[in-house]
Structure formats: C-alpha cells, structure tokens
Amino acid sequence: MNFQVTGLGRDEVKLDSPRSFLDQEDVEEAEDQQLLEPAAWRAYMERRTALREFLTTDLSSHLLKRHHARLDLLKKCSYHIEILPKHLALGDQNPLALPNAMFQLIDPWKFQRMKKVGTAQTKIQLLLLGDLLEQLDRGRAELDALLESPDPRPFLAGWGPVAQRLAELSAVMDSFLATMVPGRLHIKHRLVSDIGATKIPHIRLMLSTKTPVLFDRKGSVAHQDWASLRWFVTTQPAAPEQFELRFKLLDPRTQQERSRCGVIPVAACAFVIHDLLPSRCYKFTVKRAESYTLVYEPWRDSLTLQTRPGPPGGPSPSRLGKPGLPLTTLSER
C-alpha cells in the first residue's frame, strides 16, 4: 500500500520501507496540509504548538510529579498555630521568647477552640489540594489525548472550548499553588481577655507546618538483644525538639510478652533500647512530642526491625531481667 505525497521532493513512500517509520508523521502532516487551506493550516499548526507548549511548561508531567511529591510531604507534616503580632511576618519572631509572652495574655479556653478551627481548616486544605491535583491530572490526560489525535477539527472549528479548558486549568494551577501555603486563621472572637488598663496587643493566628520526623533506615539497626535507633528532620528546627518514641513486640507469645511495649520521651535524634528478645520483630514509631500549639498530625513514621538469633542455649543470664524489675531498659545517646 502506497501513499502519494507531493511537494516533498519524492513521488511515493512505502509503509514497509525502513525510512517510512521515521517519516510517517511528516507524511501524515503533509497530507493534512493538502486538505486544508493555507490560512486554516497556519491556524491549525499555531494552535497545536500552543497546546504542546502548555503541556510541556505549565502542565508538564514532571511538574505534576513534583506537586504530587509536595502533597505527599504535606500529608506527613505536623500543623501548628503560630501567634504573631500584626507587625511581624511568619518566621520573623524569636520562637524562644515570643510565644511564652503571648500565651500569658490569651484565654486558654478560647485558644483550645481556635485549635479545633485550625484542625478543621488543615483537613479541608489537604482535601482541597488533593481534589485540585486530580483536576490537573485529568486535564493533562484530556489535552494529551487531543494533541495525539489526528483530527484537526478541535483546533479549528472547536478551538473555543479548548482555549477555555486551558484557561480553566491555569486557574486550577494558581489555586493549587495558593492553597499550598498554610493560611491565616480567622478569629471570630477576641482571644485576649480584658486585662484592665494594660494595652491589649494586636495579634493574629497563622497555620504553620513542620516537616515530618523520619527514621534513618540505614542508621537504625537491631542486634541480638538491643536496637540502635536514629531519626532526623529534613528542616533544621530553630530550637531543640522533644520526640516521642513508641516500641512494641510484634506477635507476643505469652501474657508477659504482651507488656513489652511503651512510650518514651526523647530529647535527641538517637536512642538505644536494651533487653530485647532475640529472633523477634519489634515495631518502632517516632514523632514530635505533642505541644500546646499542635492542631493536626495525621502521620508518624514507623520501622520494623528483627533482632538477631541468640545463642543455642538461650539468652545469657546477664541479660535476663531480675524479678520485680522491668525487662526493658532504655538509654539515650
């Protein structure tokens, strides 16, 4: 089967020839050009080019992958209320001095109510981000299919709806980027109670994020009867942080083994747990210690480690817990 193509300096191109696979797109483009008037052909090519540029810049697959990764990170962050004087921007204040002074002026009951508002606002924001990202994914799939279609009609007679779709997706992208930034909390009632003649400060509440706490998979190892755990925070905090480490023996075989679990406050990013059972699996989870300003923390990192086998004769007597003492002892490093 041969296609007759004119204006390309050759008489015919055979589909079964090696070069035909390389030039097939050029052949189809040339055939389309013969079917359209010059003005229509220019409009067709200009609009295809505009659509291709939109899909490679404003709505590229690489960009959407980055937004998916950013949303996944936000779903793992912890969300807090920041109290700021109106003349300061978020991040400008001294985190060690300002909150203590401001909290002394704020009604505790009203602040707890605002924390509930912050929790609801954070959940809504994350759901909205997911919905906007789904709209962008669907829009890119639609436009990509349109670009791959050989039908010129959407680029000529039906270009109006396509142009409108491009504008809609641009607006969705703008909304997504704006929603990525934690917003200001609207205060319906005064948080500061009447304090006599003292001047009432002007404050505002903002939602801020802290990056998640993650286990160091390579640095956390289990030995025969102890485990060394390490974790980190991707963004260096301005002040030392407190963490909460949980541990639990998986698949306990006796009632005594069911008590091998607990919660440990840690003031560092490394910890050692002793007196573990050999050849057993333990689950560890870590997160920041709950603070007064925390409003939402939907995720915590977890790690499962298996201790190494013990000696053939059983555990060493020196490692057995004495009667009346807990079997699990902890040390920080």
Image: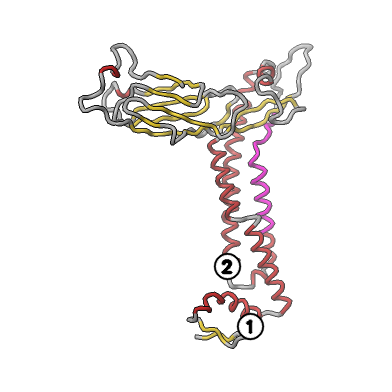
* Residue located 49% across and 34% down the image: 214
Report how many numbered discs are placed on residues in the image.
2
Can you tell which quarter of the image residue 296 is in?
A: top right
- Specify the label residue 8 is tagged with: 1
Residue at the outermost left position:
313
Q: Give how far across and how far down residue 16 sits, in percent.
A: 48, 81
Few, some or many C-alpha atoms within 10 Å of disc 1 (few <14, some 14-19, many ≥20)?
Answer: few
Between 329 and 101, which is closer to the camera in this rendering? Answer: 329
Res 253 visible: yes
- Specify the label residue 318 is tagged with: none
Few, some or many C-alpha atoms within 10 Å of disc 2 (few <14, some 14-19, many ≥20)?
Answer: few
Q: Mark 1 and 2 residues: CB-CB less than 8 Å, in contact?
A: no
Give the mark toward the camera: 1 or 2: 1
* Three-letter amino acid code at the position of disc 2: Glu
User: Is 26 drawn above or below residue 266 in the view shown?
Assistant: below
- Specify the label residue 148 is tagged with: 2
Q: Give how far across and how far down residue 305 sits, in percent.
A: 37, 33
- Tell me which numbered mark, 1 or 2, is placed earlier along the sequence: 1
Give the structural element (helix, strand or loop) at label 1. Answer: loop
